[in-house]
Amino acid sequence: MDRPQSDSLPQDLSEALKEATKEVHAQAENAEFMRNFQRGQVTRKGFKLVMASLYHVYVALEEEIERNKDNPVFAPLYFPEELHRRAALEQDMAFWYGPSWQEAVPYTAATRRYVDRLQQVGRREPELLVAHAYTRYLGDLSGGQVLKKIAQKALDLPSSGEGLAFFTFPNIDSATKFKQLYRSRMNTLEMTPEVRQRVTEEAKTAFLLNIQLFEELQELLNQYPEDQHPSQAAGLRHRASNRLQDSISVEQSRGTPLLSNLSQMPLIRWALTLSVVVATVAMGFYAL
């Protein structure tokens, strides 16, 4: 007799989520925005954008955590002093966007979708909130610390940590020990096999929402090549040039006299030149 799908997962919830999200976790790490970040190819504009998105995400996440702090489906994971990021992100927003940051912080479409899902979960399906807390906080305590060092070096930020408060957890002495505690608390949550499976799927959704956010941020950056890291901008120009050459080759193979009589037609020559410039900028829109 076939066993239910959830029985194939590890017994501990924390291990089940880790196992179930391996593939989508790898996809998130390999998103172009994150690959560039890990290589130190991050600009101030790009960093400001991702920090702004994280601000909105954590405001929503922590509002829903507060709403459900006494709910047994989440209460064992309530660690506001150790984990909550809103206050730290407010410091970072003031550093990056100035004293009027509340009016200046961008709110992108992918960020809004992420926030909408968090609010839906917190208000209608609070048993799934653990999936989002697990995805965000344990990630911040792990890979987030590496990203902090990369950003500090790439952006030449003060050694005092200004602009990077989000990555600092002053009330956690040992990230390793705290993650062990958090996982052990996760494993005490009582849930039916059906709920457990839904939590697992929600963890995958959380990673997908992050991937969509990274893809959107990269597209926004690609619209402004002058704000790209030099190596990224060169890559965009190379891709745009290759696509333009491919287009010319196709037209020539069709017998279209693209370049014929241009010397006698200065207006057409000017129009073609302008179209090349526009194409070079536009090609960056969908680099992912």
Image (tube, grey):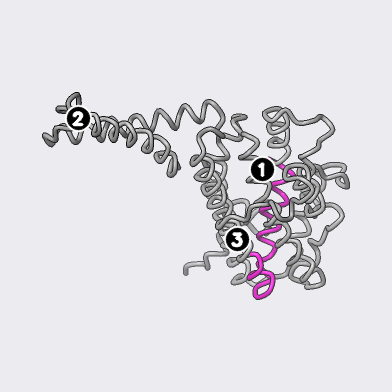
Judged from the image, the secondary structure of the residue bearing numbered disc 2 is loop
> How far is mark 2 from mark 1, CA to CA?
47 Å
Residue corresponding to mark 3: 112
Task: Count neighbours of disc 3 (C-alpha within 10 A) and say few if under 14, some if 14 to 19, many if 20 or more.
Answer: some
Q: Which segment is the magenta one?
A: 118-143
Between discs 2 and 1, the one toward the N terminus: 1
Residue 143 at x, y percent in the picture: 68, 40
Q: Is residue 76 magenta?
A: no
Between discs 2 and 3, the one toward the N terminus: 3
* Amino acid type of the residue tagged 3 in the rendering: Arg
Q: Is residue 221 above or below residue 194?
A: above
Judged from the image, the secondary structure of the residue bearing numbered disc 3 is helix
Q: Residue furthest top?
A: 263
Q: Which of the 4 image quarters holds residue 193?
A: bottom right
* Amino acid type of the residue tagged 2 in the rendering: Met
Between discs 3 and 1, the one toward the N terminus: 1
Residue 59 at x, y percent in the picture: 73, 59
Residue corresponding to mark 1: 48
- Left or right relative to 102: residue 160: right
Judged from the image, the secondary structure of the residue bearing numbered disc 1 is helix
- Left or right relative to 82: residue 59: left
Residue 176 at x, y percent in the picture: 79, 42
* Amino acid type of the residue tagged 1 in the rendering: Lys
Q: Is residue 86 above or below residue 41?
A: below
